[in-house]
Image (cartoon, rainbow, N blue to C red):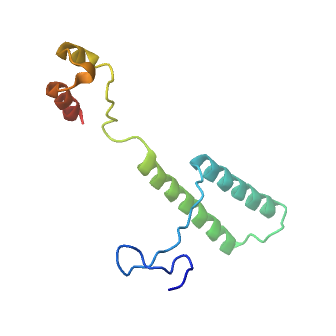
Amino acid sequence: MSSEVGTQPSECGSALQIPAKVLQFVSRETQIQLRGRRNFDHWHCITKQLEPFGPKERGLLLQRQADDERDDQEWSRRHGPRPGGAIVLSISDRTAVAASGKPDGEGDERHHLSLRQRL
């Protein structure tokens, strides 16, 4: 067998190990800043007549704007507010634990069931 990474069989059978590809995290704020710079650079080149701007380029610009808007809507759907709001678990339910007389609510099934019902 070869000693190169990604060519040795794994312990799970005959599958080969594949080297990991680590992707750099890019925040939403950075994505929007980069888009703004791209749009400004494009606008600058057009106004200084450094690149042509005819019907073909206008169509590409409108397509890019539509793609950006679609991406924003998809991001908002994944990361925006949820219908019906969020569920917040209250940490101040120590009265039920204190009433049981057991430290940290040990054996207090009533308390644990109430937390499960909230979810």
Is 33 located above or below residue 59 in the figure? above
Is 75 rendered above or below residue 100? below
* Quadrant position of the C terminus in the picture: top left
Residue 63, position as x, y percentages in the image:
58, 66
Quarter residue 74 falls in:
bottom left
Count of picture labels: 0
Q: Is residue 79 above or below residue 17?
A: above
| Residue that appears at 85% across and 61% down | 48
Residue 58 location (% of width, % of height): 66, 68
**Is 14 or 3 nearer to us in this picture?**
3
Left or right of residue 84, residue 16 in this image = right
Q: Nearer the viewer, residue 59 or 99?
A: 99
Residue occupying the point 49% across, 58% down: 70
Q: Position of residue 32 (x, y in %)?
A: 62, 50
Residue situated furthest left in the rendering: 110
The image shows residue 16, relative to residue 86, as above or below, that is below
Q: Residue at x 41, y 75 (%)?
A: 10
For this view, does 87 lie left or right of residue 80?
left
